[in-house]
Image (tube, rainbow, N blue to C red):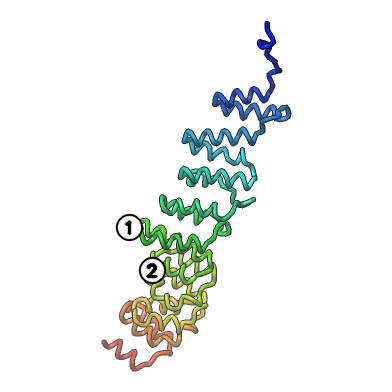
Amino acid sequence: VSPKDIVAASPYDADDRIDWLIEHFKFEDAMEAVTSSEKDLQRHTKLSVGQSYLDHLLFLEQYQEAAKLCHNILGNNKRLWEEEVLKFARVHQLRTVSPYLPLDSNPLEPYIYEMVLYEFLKTDPEGFLSKIKEWPPVLYNVPAVVNATLEHLLVVSQQTFKSVLLEALALLYSYDNKYDKALQMYLKLGHSGVFDLIAKHNLYGVIHNMIEDLMELNADLTITLLDSGEVPPDIVVARLSSNKHLLYRYLDALDQRKDRSAAKKYHGLLVSLYADFAKDKLLALLRRSDHYPIQEALNICKD
């Protein structure tokens, strides 16, 4: 044997085994090996093997599997998360990784969440609305997402998608404390969420010009809302003056309160409205009240 034929041999160690597993694309076995032998490793870590595994899965277009593994491999490392999300972005798979993104603890930079929302906005309006409902608005720049939504609405032709995006827009406006615009969106949609929004944020002062629209949407819920006394009856009566049936609904409810004092000044008007819409209630009102013009009431009864 000549000196040229001499080969130096070294013991087969844990790093060598992981090299072999990676070379043969046995990444699950490599992950198990690195977890069980981490103290003996010199060249490999759980993170390095895990990142190779993620790259391999992305190459194979096994995006769901890669997304599921991200948290186990990347942990709470913000920089690594952001780098990995950009890899998903390059293959248009941000929607796939979105359920696994950190939200409450150690959130990523806002642009990451905005990228995900923009992909949903363009490809899956229902998913976009779900994320707007699910994600805390502190994660992203709300005005930027509002602008993107408004721009996208200009090119959306399907009415169903438009309605979904308008609902998302209403939520975004409420997150941005632009409650008047949020209310307008809900009214445009005929969405009952408008009543929750008013009550939750005490928006009684901004609904004066919307009272008729609210009554048209749901008279019962509007009357319940107005029953709080936050909007003076004079304002409600003025706003409903051109719609006699809705005015009847409101004044009838006002007169059914335990404290009927607020309704007394409208009994003359209510006599006329009962004559038109609820004749069975007219006699009872005439008997218990003296807050209406007698002659006018007699004329109405004759007619």
* Quadrant (top left, top right, bottom left, bottom right) of the N terminus: top right
Could you say where residue 168 lies in the image, as x and y percent from the top left?
A: 45, 59
Picture residue at 53% right of the left edge, 33% below the top: 56
Could you say where residue 286 lies in the image, as x and y percent from the top left?
A: 38, 85
Q: How many numbered discs?
A: 2
Amino acid carrying label 1: it is Ser
Ranked by sequence position, the earlier of labels 1 and 2 is: 1
Please give the residue where the numbered disc 2 appears in the rendered image.
217
Q: Quadrant of residue 148?
A: bottom left
Label 1 SS = loop
Query: Which of the labelled discs sits on residue 79, or is there none?
Result: none
- Position of residue 109 relative to residue 80, above or below, is below
Residue positioned most to the right: 39
CA neighbours of label 1 inside 10 A, class few (<14), some (14 to 19), many (20+): few
Residue positioned most to the top: 1
Picture residue at 39% right of the left edge, 75% below the top: 212
Which of these two is toward me, 8 or 185? 8
Could you say where residue 103 lies in the image, as x and y percent from the top left?
A: 59, 51
Label 2 SS = helix
Residue positioned most to the left: 303
Q: Is residue 79 left or right of residue 156?
A: right
Amino acid carrying label 2: it is Leu
CA neighbours of label 2 inside 10 A, class few (<14), some (14 to 19), many (20+): some
Picture residue at 27% right of the left edge, 88% below the top: 302
Q: In this view, does 129 lie to the left or right of 200?
A: left
Picture residue at 70% right of the left edge, 28% below the top: 41
Please give the residue where the numbered disc 1 appears in the rendered image.
157
- Position of residue 1 relative to residue 256, above or below, is above
- In 3D space, how far apart are the residues under numbered discs 1 and 2 (Cα atoms)? 25 Å
Which of these two is toward me, 176 or 232? 176
Q: Nearer the viewer, mark 1 or mark 2?
A: 1
* Quadrant (top left, top right, bottom left, bottom right) of the C terminus: bottom left
